Image (tube, grey):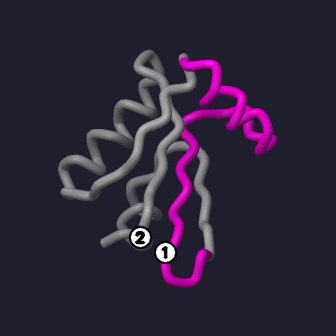
């Protein structure tokens, strides 16, 4: 499973999401939208809100995506 989180350091929900992932020992790739290339990636996906997270099954290449921070949904999907 490959998890990517688009976030910024000034977004409270982003900080909460990253803390939740860390506390649950879930590895992820962070893409801080303060960097133009990551902001552009997000814009190209049509996403205007952060945090935005993708979960890719590396075997099937299926991708789930989530906007915002919802611990209940995260627990159901990742734990």
Q: Is residue 67 left or right of residue 45?
A: left
What range is drawn magenta here?
35-61
Q: Is residue 6 left or right of residue 12?
A: right
Which residue in the protein does label 2 denote? Answer: 1
Which residue in the protein does label 1 denote? Answer: 58
Q: Is residue 64 above or below residue 67?
A: below
Q: Nearer the viewer, residue 31 or 67?
A: 31
Q: Is residue 46 left or right of residue 21?
A: right
Residue 26 inside the magenta-drawn segment: no
Residue sitting at 60 percent across and 47 percent down?
A: 67
Q: Give the alpha-carbon distance from disc 2 to disc 1, as whole Å.
A: 6 Å
Q: Quadrant of the C terminus?
A: bottom left
- Residue 44 x/y as whole percent: 79, 39
Are there few (<14), some (14-19), or many (20+) residues within 10 Å of tag 1?
A: few
Labelled disc at residue 72: none
Q: Residue 62's image quarter?
A: bottom right
Q: Nearer the viewer, residue 23 or 40?
A: 40
């Amino acid at each position: 499973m490959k998890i990517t989180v688009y976030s910024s350091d000034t977004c409270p929900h982003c900080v909460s999401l990253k803390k939740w992932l860390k506390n649950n020992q879930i590895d992820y790739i962070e893409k801080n939208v303060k960097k133009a290339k990551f902001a552009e990636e997000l814009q190209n996906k049509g996403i205007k809100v952060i945090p935005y997270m993708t979960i890719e099954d590396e075997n099937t290449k299926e991708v789930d995506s989530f906007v915002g921070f919802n611990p209940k949904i995260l627990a159901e999907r990742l734990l």
